[in-house]
Amino acid sequence: MATVVISKEYGYVVLTTVSSGVMMMYLASNVSRARKKFGIEYPRMYVDKEPIFNCYLRAHLNTVENYPIFLYLLLLGGLEHPITSSVAGMLWVVSRIFYAHGYYTGDPRKRMRGGFGYLGLLAMLGCTVKFGLRLLGAI
């Protein structure tokens, strides 16, 4: 049986989680502002007349789609590697802002300005896999 001791540095992971929540609220508020700007009433999602609005919505929804994997990689990998996981998590959080603002231009290819966030996800994946293997006694 393995024992997990949460280090004080796990506080960085907790704060990274909080910052990701702030980023999610920021993206959601941008969609709300875009709804008002372009006159898109609820519950409409995608519209043909204002393709820029669709870009705002997709930037937010893509982040929502990727958020669960980000959270579990951050929280689990951070148990053994809190600093590495927190730095990698912040890289992902910042990348989502770049991703969204690239998308907001109306040219969806510019969303790849935030592609550097995958480096953060890969680092968190490595931390989480290492943690799991250690728990199993494989390393």
Image: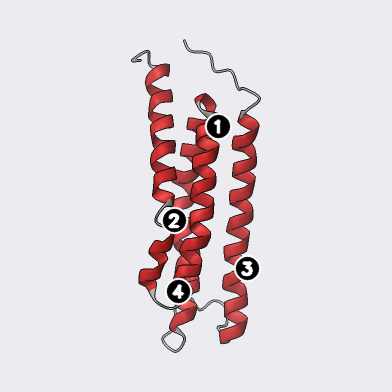
Of helix, strand and loop, which one carries label 2?
helix
Instruction: Name the amino acid, label 2.
Output: Glu
Q: CA distance from mark 1 to mark 3?
A: 30 Å
Q: What separation in Å lies between label 1 and label 2 (alpha carbons)?
A: 25 Å
First reached walking from the N terminus: tag 1 or tag 3: 3
- Label 3: which residue? 29
Kindly indicate the quadrant of the structure image that contains residue 11: top right
Image disc number at residue 83: 1
Which of the marked residues, 4 or 3, is nearer the chain's N terminus? 3
| 54, above or below 24, in the image | below
The residue that mark 2 highlights is: 65
Question: Crowding near pointer 1: few (<14 within 10 Å), some, many (20+)?
Answer: some
**Front position among marks 2 and 3:** 3
Q: Secondary structure at mark 4?
A: helix
Q: Which residue is mark 4?
A: 55
Which residue is at 60% across, 22% downward? 6
In terms of image quadrants, where is residue 126? top left
Q: Is residue 93 above or below residue 58?
A: above
Mark 2 surroundings within 10 Å by alpha-carbon count, few (fewer than 14), some (14 through 19), many (20 or more):
few
Q: Amino acid at mark 4?
A: Cys
In the rendered image, residue 70, in percent from the top left (x then y), is placed at 47, 45
Residue type pointed to by label 3: Ser
Q: Is residue 3 above or below residue 42?
A: above
Where is residue 89? Give x, y as percent: 51, 43
- Name the mark nearer the viewer: 4 or 2: 4
Residue count near mark 3 (Cα–Cα under 10 Å), binned few <14, some 14–19, many ≥20: few
Mark 2–mark 3 distance (CA, rounded to whole Å):
17 Å
Instruction: Inspect the image, locate mark 1, and give the three-letter code of the amino acid beneath it.
Output: Ile
Tell which of 85 and 39 is nearer to you.
85
Residue drawn at x 35%, y 70% is 109
* Residue at mark 4 to residue at mark 3: CA–CA distance: 14 Å
